[in-house]
Image (cartoon, rainbow, N blue to C red):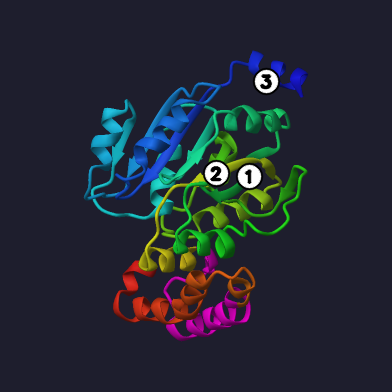
Amino acid sequence: MTRIYREVKNLDLKISGVIPAFDAEETLEAVILSLQSQKIPLKEIVVIDDGSEDKTSEIANNNNCYLVKNSSNLGRGYSRNLGVKNSTSEFILFCDSSNLIRHDFTEKAILHFEDPLVSAVFGRIKNEKSLNDRYSRWRGRHLFREHLPQRKDVHPVNCLITYAVVLRKDAIEAVGNFNEGLKKCEDIDLGKRLSDQGFKILSDPSLCAYSIRRETMFSLCLRFNRWFSNDSEKSFRVFPTFWNTLRSCYGIYAKEDLKSRDFGSFIISLIMPFWLTAIGLFSPRKLN
């Protein structure tokens, strides 16, 4: 690995950082600092402010980032597409505005790009260790699946996940970039196109993103919906989603909560289907 790293280092590779952000004033500065602390210095950090109404843009400017601000909230696909277009390096480190990465993230990830067919490398996601409220515990157990055994080896996968990922820019452009019309599942869509065109996507379990976002019941419902939506669904389907969520929450999640003696998370599992249905009925735009 040392020999490979020397070869990669000698190529003088350029890496741009891109952070899509929406109303991220509570976490953005910490995320920027984690990107600025990378052992392989980033050529630039681009913040795509997707129509925020808080101090997101101000924080980006104050931390020497290149800021692109959307006039309104245009969604994840549009913002990631814009991030690719505005980056000026052959590799792009995408990191969500609520995730921290270790200082050696890009150093480890870039090793895999010795293979010209590798288009993307990502790893795991976990809660930052200081988070122990019931929403974080539920997220860690049922979304991040922190309690399950993890593979130790680097392995190819057919899906792309972008909470923290290094991408080869020319591969992304070769398959048409992120679909700017998708407000969710934009990474899954891009991953399908990369795989269909013969590019490789790798999962490296030594890489990890650490979520520092503090959830509410409302935000947890939105995240749950994004993670388990079908990218072909153009609108939220209230009743099929209710039954699917009910089966998952009562048949799997609540049992896991009880097994862990986590009664706070158990309550969340019981009410999640009803909260999500209420949002779908009264605020459907939040879920589409």
| Secondary structure category for the residue under label 2 | strand
| The stretch drawn in magenta includes residue 239 | yes
Tell me if I can see residue 288 in this picture: no
| First in residue order: circle 1 vs circle 2 | 1
**Labelled pair 1, 2 in contact (Cβ < 8 Å):** yes
Residue under label 3, please give it: 8
Q: CA distance from mark 3 to mark 1?
A: 20 Å
Residue at the image point whose x is 68% and y is 31% from the top: 113
Residue under label 2, please give it: 209
Left or right of residue 104, residue 197 in this image: right
Which quadrant of the structure image shows residue 56?
top left
Is residue 69 shown above or below 253?
Answer: above
Residue under label 1, please give it: 123
| The stretch drawn in magenta includes residue 252 | yes
Is residue 56 shown above or below 136?
Answer: above
**Labelled pair 3, 1 in contact (Cβ < 8 Å):** no
Magenta stretch prevailing secondary structure: helix
Spot occupied by residue 2 in the image (x, y as percentages of width and height): 75, 20
User: Which residue is more in the foreground, 14 or 226?
Assistant: 226
Crowding at label 1, few (<14), some or many (≥20) Cα neighbours within 10 Å? many
| Secondary structure category for the residue under label 3 | helix
Crowding at label 2, few (<14), some or many (≥20) Cα neighbours within 10 Å? many
- Of tags 3 and 1, which is closer to the observer? 1
